[in-house]
Image (tube, rainbow, N blue to C red):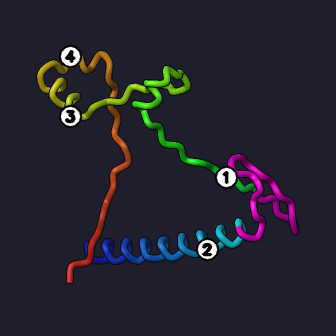
Amino acid sequence: MKELCDSYLAAKAMEVSAKNIRIKAEMALIQAIGPKKLEGTETHATDGFKISVTSKLTRKLDFDSYVGLGLDFVDMVPKINLANLRVYEKTHPELVAVCVTSKPAKTLIKVTEVI
């Protein structure tokens, strides 16, 4: 088991290092290109490479102000309340089974070296 943990931690360290190198390279490319658009994709061809730079904006909605203005540009998307779902799964599993499908997600692992 020690060998597996050591191998995992070594691979994780290489991955973090490679990610940091990639991020620095991305930032250098972005700075060199100097995107003009605040939002959207720009494509540049140079030295045998095609480079696409996508700029994005994040937006946060003040829901109370939005409702007060009577606007209609927000899609209200249903989201499962996990705590309430678990109560229903215990009390009425047959009802939950009609409207909720569950499938396994990716299993995560965290290894910490103990000294």
Disc 1 vs disc 2: which is toward the camera? 1
Q: Of label 1 and label 2, which has the lower sequence position?
A: 2
Real-space Cα separation, disc 3 to disc 1, in angstroms: 37 Å
Position of residue 6 in the picture relative to residue 29 (left or right): left
Q: Of label 1 and label 4, which has the lower sequence position?
A: 1
Q: Amino acid at mark 3?
A: Ala
Q: Residue furthest left?
A: 91
Tag 3 and tag 2, C-beta contact below 8 Å: no
Tag 1 and tag 4, C-beta contact below 8 Å: no
Q: Of label 3 and label 1, which has the lower sequence position?
A: 1
Residue annotated with mark 4: 94
Is residue 111 within the magenta segment?
Answer: no
Residue 8 screen position, x and y as percent: 37, 71
Is residue 46 within the magenta segment?
Answer: yes
**Secondary element type, mark 3:** helix
Position of residue 100 in the picture relative to residue 34 (left or right): left
